[in-house]
Amino acid sequence: MAIPNENLKSIMKHFGLTNHALAKALGLDPSLVSRYLSGQRQLKAASPQMEAIADFILTRSKRVADMDWLKEQFAAAGLPTELSTVYRFKQNLIMWLATDGKTLRKNLGASLPGDIAGHEPPAAKMQNRIIETADSAVKIGSFQIVLELRPVLEMLPHGCAADIFLSSDQIAAMVNEDVAALFLKSVNENDLKIRMVVCVSGNTKAMSVLVDTYMAALITGHIQLSVVHGMTQTVTNQMHLILPGTLAVLVTETPGCVSPPVAVFLREPSFITEIQSSFEQAARYAQPVLNIYGDDFSRNILEIIYQEFCTPGALDVVKDNVNPMYLTEDAYNRVLRSHGHSEAEYAWRSVEFTRFKSGMDETLRGGAVFREILSLSRLNQIVRDGFCRMPGLYFMKKGFVHLDAQGCADVLCGYIRYLETFPNFHLLILDDITLLHSDNCWQLKQNHHLAINHWSGPEPVMIHSDQLMLLREFQTHFDRLWAQSAGGIGSRANVISILRDVEGRLNA
């Protein structure tokens, strides 16, 4: 009795393949595919047809989501799911699709067809062994590149560094959804640091996509972005990924991005050393798009903040916290006293805040438009916690500061005073802000510079840039966020009402 090949049916349905389409791609008679599906014709693991079907399915698997779906099917069938190479993935696929796959594993005690003597054509067996072991095997398509690269990144030591060179900002592989997700996962879970040097083509849309894709890692300082201006390669676009002393990945794609990208994974030590040296030369002459300041106290950081709040020009702020700049001098000094400073340390900090405060008030009196966005969910959390955590730089010290409930309430009262005093000061409170703004503050001095204070890591980090192409991307993002609720009737009164409610709960 013929037993239908349900796995082949399932995979054809997942990839949207008809009998005719599969037969045409493999050069088979459509009736043969029908017989495979119905079980009237067995699809043997060692047959050339099985090899061809597996190769075709792998070329259709262009997304990590496809790979994850297949791994779910493998797990349900009792096949191993720790698959670190395309070769191993193909072996599993063959054993899952083959009519005799389950029987072979049971009778021979093997789980992968390449390990079953006599069940793979000698030529194919040799070819697969080369694919598995070759140092520079070519990987075709983003799926294969991600499949090969994922275990490499997962095994990197915590806090490791990588270098990426893009011969053009138009290379699609770097902004591919799965490739980007892989890098961002390594950044988030393994604290991967990346130096990225990009040859700028003048295509503002391409650079916009690149910045938007990696904005979260730029904010945290995990990606240091530098650019080189000039002509870029027109025959092919290339991406070089270098894990010093470990691996070099060379990705090449056509400018039109119609054909899939191809990549070579190289582990030859001398090659890695030399390409690393070449990258250092390129990075030396590249123009940094942003500067990253660590937690060492710096006069430069204070002056950046002073320029934002205390010099003429519009300022946009989105903050996952409250802003101590709106404290009165007496309230600010109360917080300083609680930190246990000596009289001399207390005195200069108090004088500095007075300088900032008077400068900000003068800027607003001069007509500069300030727009600030706060998160209601964060305000409610502050009420629950009874304090808020912020970088110590707001109080001119290292590390973090926990502003107590009274201090938080004083800041909210300060917001209300400015809303009632300056019609050019605008505040928007959203129910929640995006994850992109979690634990950080953006301050955009329009058409001048960008500063981001990020405090989700072990130490606060400040990101600063005066590059117009980066300012444009962050400004566009802020404007989209502001547009969510701006301009509503009575919104100013509503914001004041919300602030009074949160302040009252803090003082309760």
Image (tube, helix red, strand yellow):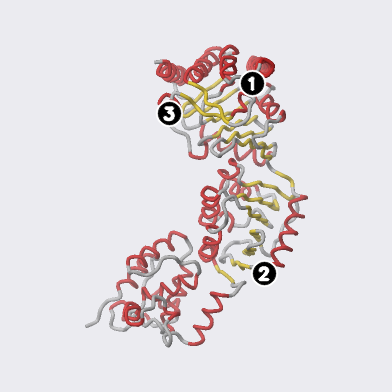
Query: Which residue is at a point 68% across and 27% down the rendered structure image?
Result: 302
Q: CA distance from mark 2 to mark 3?
A: 52 Å
Please tell me which of labels 2 and 1 falls first in the chain. Answer: 2
* Contact between labelled residues 3 and 2, with CB atoms less than 8 Å apart: no
Please tell me which of labels 1 and 3 falls first in the chain. Answer: 1
244 above or below 53? above
Q: CA distance from mark 1 to mark 3?
A: 31 Å
Q: CA distance from mark 2 to mark 1?
A: 58 Å
329 above or below 163? above
Q: Secondary structure at mark 1?
A: loop
Residue toward you, 255 or 100: 100
Q: Amino acid at mark 3?
A: Gln
Image quadrant containing the C terminus: top left
Q: Amino acid at mark 1?
A: Ala
Residue toward you, 182 or 507: 507
Counting from the top left corner in percent of width and height, residue 125 is at: 49, 83
Q: Quadrant of residue 33?
A: bottom left
| Residue on which the image places disc 1 | 368
Counting from the top left corner in percent of width and height, residue 8 is at: 34, 73
| Residue on which the image places disc 2 | 268
